[in-house]
């Protein structure tokens, strides 16, 4: 520190004040004291590394490729059996029975289960509103928002006040008079001091402080001092400013920028959680539909198997053997066991759906049974692989967070680079003083400007070798390189998920067509078997075994057809999740309104911040 003191006259006061404030106004507009040095990349040099990640994935995809279209035409089997289609559709387990009235077995409470019919739209809306993981993500977003406000408060002005009282009685070296008396051999005083002012941190790294001090001093004995009591007042204007290390708004606002990135990342986490909840809710809904259809199929197998068993019992002693009757009874009992298994699957799927919804009206511990009223659609879709990949890169929360990580790491590189500079700080201060026996007259002395003091000084330091700062800089650069690699991995993962989901959509739609043909053909087999049964003179063991097999195969064909439609809908839901468009598809918007802080919308989303 190199101070320079000199009392000046009142004419120099305005000059001193201008000299002190001019650097403050100049420094506030500065970004960095030095140009980027060798080895420090700016954002323009990072841009190619970021854009190449997506270009690499779509480079070999033609820009004008025809969209992927799922076909919905009838198979040869369906065209052949079209005249008997209505009759064949009535054979076997029926879709309508899955809606309500299924026997689900006794509840654990012993009460009869109540049924609550819900549409898919209602389930998704309730899940988004009440899901516990979504609520936690909302709280996390609020926490990051509060942290951002705390970071921005670092530049708020500070009002300070420091009152104090001192009572002092101490011996001191006095003056010996000619008569051997000691003058002022005792210091006896009472001091009241009050200091107050404003301190304003600057985005350049420094601070400006304006303060005033008031001190009332009483010294004893009163006759030996003048004025006594005395009012000593002062007004001080000071500036401290780093010139190298810690200089510039880009460095000192880094915490705010990082907090902004964290806030935006938490918003993307909220979007990701909501997208996952929408997909999970839809999947759980369709799994419940499938479980109920399994129960429908199991009930149907018991019913048709019981009919065969009863026919054999009525023909006992005529053309039915004991072995045939025993085989029919065993088959029916086996199918009853399948009913119990299917009931358990329905209960499990029901509880899973209620857990995702977290609806206070449908607690998981309750006995209410959710009855899905919607059936999975089998409408064909058109999708462009290139467009789907680009949409995922723009809308995927994981890709957005990876981009934010790159920006955060780049901020860290700039800060670490600045910390390699030497420490050179500027200190400047101007003070006006007054002293009088009256408080008001003391401040009049301050206003006259007759008693002025100014200080200008500097402080320099630099670590020999600067190894810690250089190591931190290398670490920051490596962290940024890792963030770029993580971004590339996020883009690659998004492309992989889009391709897998789109292929699953296409495959499952083709399976709908194929399993529908399988179901129609199997219904025709069972119909033909029923016609043959009316013309047979006796029920042979082979015929009965064939009939049981055809019943089970028809049940299997029905479940495969239902499963293909459900898997198709689940694949569509998953496709919109990985593309980041699941909320828009379900008309769900996110509006987070902050009346105090205005933040820009996140790039690539339609939700407002």
Image: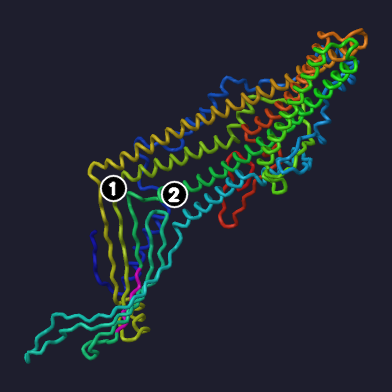
Q: Is residue 110 magenta?
A: no
Q: Is residue 607 above or below residue 540?
A: below
Q: How is the image coloured?
A: rainbow
Q: Is residue 72 at all visible to an observer of this figure?
A: no
Q: Position of residue 263 (x, y in %)?
A: 53, 47
Q: Residue placed at 42% from the left, 62% from the top?
A: 200
Q: Mark 1 sits on what residue?
A: 422
Q: Position of residue 461 (x, y in %)?
A: 25, 51
Which secondary structure dominates the residues rendered in magenta?
Answer: strand
Q: Is residue 55 at all visible to an observer of this figure?
A: yes
Q: Residue placed at 77% from the left, 16% from the top?
A: 553
- Looking at the rendered structure, the secondary structure element under dot 2 is helix
Q: Mark 2 sits on what residue?
A: 255
> Of 157 and 570, which appears nearest the observer?
570
Q: Which residues are magenta?
A: 230-236
Q: Is residue 235 magenta?
A: yes
Q: Position of residue 257 (x, y in %)?
A: 47, 47
């Amino acid at each position: 520190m190199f101070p320079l003191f000199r009392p000046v006259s009142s004419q120099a006061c305005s000059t001193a004040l201008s000299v002190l404030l001019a650097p403050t106004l100049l420094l506030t507009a500065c970004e960095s004291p030095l140009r980027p040095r060798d080895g420090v990349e700016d954002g323009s040099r990072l841009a190619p590394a970021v854009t190449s990640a997506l270009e690499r994935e779509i480079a070999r995809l033609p820009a004008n490729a025809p969209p992927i279209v799922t076909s919905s035409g009838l198979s040869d089997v369906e065209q052949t059996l079209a005249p008997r289609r209505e009759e064949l559709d009535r054979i076997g387990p029926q879709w309508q029975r899955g809606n309500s009235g299924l026997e689900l077995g006794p509840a654990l409470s012993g009460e009869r289960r109540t049924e609550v019919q819900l549409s898919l739209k209602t389930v998704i809306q309730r899940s988004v509103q009440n899901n516990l993981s979504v609520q936690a993500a909302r709280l996390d977003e609020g926490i990051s928002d509060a942290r951002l406000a705390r970071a921005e408060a670092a530049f708020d002005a500070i009002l300070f006040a420091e009152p104090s009282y001192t009572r002092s009685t101490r011996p001191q070296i006095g003056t010996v008079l000619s008569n051997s008396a000691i003058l002022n051999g005792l210091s006896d005083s009472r001091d009241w001091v009050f200091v107050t002012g404003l301190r304003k941190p600057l985005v350049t790294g420094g601070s400006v402080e304006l303060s005033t001090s008031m001190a009332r001093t009483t010294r004893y004995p009163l006759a030996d001092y003048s004025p006594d009591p005395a009012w000593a007042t002062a007004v001080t204007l000071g500036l401290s400013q780093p010139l190298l290390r810690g200089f510039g708004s880009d460095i000192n606002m880094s915490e705010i920028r990082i907090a902004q990135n964290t806030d935006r990342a938490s918003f993307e986490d909220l979007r990701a959680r909501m997208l996952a909840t929408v997909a999970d809710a839809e999947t759980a809904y369709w799994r419940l539909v499938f479980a109920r259809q399994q129960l429908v199929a199991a009930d149907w197998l018991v019913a048709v198997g019981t009919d065969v068993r009863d026919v054999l019992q009525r023909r006992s002693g005529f053309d039915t053997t004991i072995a045939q009757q025993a085989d029919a009874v065993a088959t029916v009992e086996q199918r009853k066991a399948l009913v119990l298994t299917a009931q358990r699957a329905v209960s499990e799927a029901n509880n899973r759906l209620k857990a995702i919804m977290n609806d206070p009206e449908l607690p998981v511990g309750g006995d209410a049974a959710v009855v899905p009223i919607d059936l999975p659609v089998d409408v064909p879709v058109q999708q462009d692989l290139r467009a789907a990949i680009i949409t995922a890169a723009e809308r995927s929360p994981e890709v957005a967070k990876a981009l934010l990580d790159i920006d955060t790491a780049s901020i860290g590189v700039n800060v670490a680079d600045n910390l390699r500079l030497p420490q050179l700080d500027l200190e400047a201060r101007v003070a006006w003083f007054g002293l009088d026996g009256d408080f008001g007259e003391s401040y009049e002395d301050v206003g006259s400007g007759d008693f002025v003091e100014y200080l200008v000084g500097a402080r320099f330091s630099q670590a020999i070798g600067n190894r810690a700062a250089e190591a931190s800089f290398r670490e920051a650069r490596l962290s940024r390189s890792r963030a770029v690699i993580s971004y590339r991995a996020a883009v690659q993962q998004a492309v992989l998920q889009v391709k897998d989901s789109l292929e699953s959509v296409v495959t499952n739609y083709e399976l709908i067509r194929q399993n529908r043909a399988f179901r129609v053909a199997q219904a025709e087999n069972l119909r033909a078997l029923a016609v043959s049964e009316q013309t047979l003179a006796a029920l042979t063991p082979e015929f009965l075994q064939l009939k049981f097999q055809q019943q089970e195969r028809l049940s299997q064909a029905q479940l495969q057809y239902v499963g293909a439609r459900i898997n198709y809908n689940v694949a569509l839901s998953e496709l919109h999740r990985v593309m980041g468009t699941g909320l828009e598809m379900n008309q769900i918007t996110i509006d987070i309104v902050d009346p105090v802080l205005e933040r820009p919308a996140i790039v690539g989303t339609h939700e407002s911040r």
